[in-house]
Image (cartoon, rainbow, N blue to C red):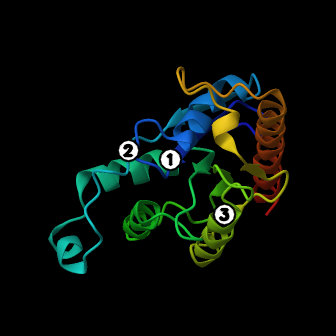
Amino acid sequence: MSIDGPLHFVVLLGSLRRGSLNGALARALPALAPADMTVEPLGSIGGFPIYDGDVEAQGIPAPVVAMGEAIRKADGVVVVTPEYNYSIPGGVKNAIDWLSRLKPQPFLDKPIALESASVGMLGGARAQYHLRQTFVMLEARVFNKPEVFVTQAHTKIDAKTGELTDAPTREIIAQQLKAFAAFVRAHRRGAATT
């Protein structure tokens, strides 16, 4: 794999709602990515059963296995999620818990970028901080800056089309994706010299 070659990122969406503001954010990513980067959705986490060790003992569900393989093959993961009750939505935590049971664990040493959107003034910041704690345990490489917290997102996304229309928001997302690509390449260079 070329250190400076094209990058492929996948998006883990933490919302299941059809009209989700975070879904709109996730759909905007491919158009805002640098020319040498592809971004594609991982698919819905809505089909994952609630994590249960007894279910795991019978075999990890096929949707979990497929998503884990897609994460392993990707150069990085962009997690786009709302904030529920000051923290991570249950569906996101459930998906991460399932994925962490795979061998090899797909988040190990995987570059991760975080984005969130909210109708409030913090833009999902608390969910992102809790995700960072979870990814520390999984030994992922969480990207730091620039951060993307889309505040008052309902004013920045067209309710009829679901399109992210706010120019400053689009610009900071483009900046994040460009910087995330540099972060991934720097990690590759470091790995190549060890």
Tag 3: amino acid: Gln
Q: Position of residue 167 (x, y in %)?
A: 81, 27
User: Label 1 belongs to which residue?
Assistant: 13
Q: Secondary structure at mark 1?
A: strand
Total labels drawn? 3
User: Label 2 belongs to which residue?
Assistant: 44
Is residue 147 in view from this perspective?
Answer: yes
Q: Secondary structure at mark 3?
A: helix
Q: Residue at x 32, y 51 (%)?
A: 46
State left or right for residue 122 relative to residue 134: right
In the image, residue 119 sits, relative to residue 35, either above or below, namely: below
Tag 1: amino acid: Leu
Query: Could you tell me if the residues under marks 1 and 2 are in contact, i.e. CB atoms within 8 Å?
Result: yes
User: Label 3 belongs to which residue?
Assistant: 128
Q: Position of residue 69 (x, y in %)?
A: 42, 49
Q: Secondary structure at mark 2?
A: loop
In the image, residue 134 sits, relative to residue 153, either above or below, namely: below
Is residue 104 in view from this perspective?
Answer: no
Q: Spatial distance from mark 1 to mark 2, Cα to Cα?
A: 7 Å
State left or right for residue 57 relative to residue 145: left
Mark 3 and mark 1 lie on one chain; the one further toward the N terminus is 1
Q: Spatial distance from mark 3 to mark 2, Cα to Cα?
A: 19 Å
Q: Residue at x 65, y 32 (%)?
A: 29
Label 2 packing within 10 angstroms: few (<14), some (14-19), many (20+):
some
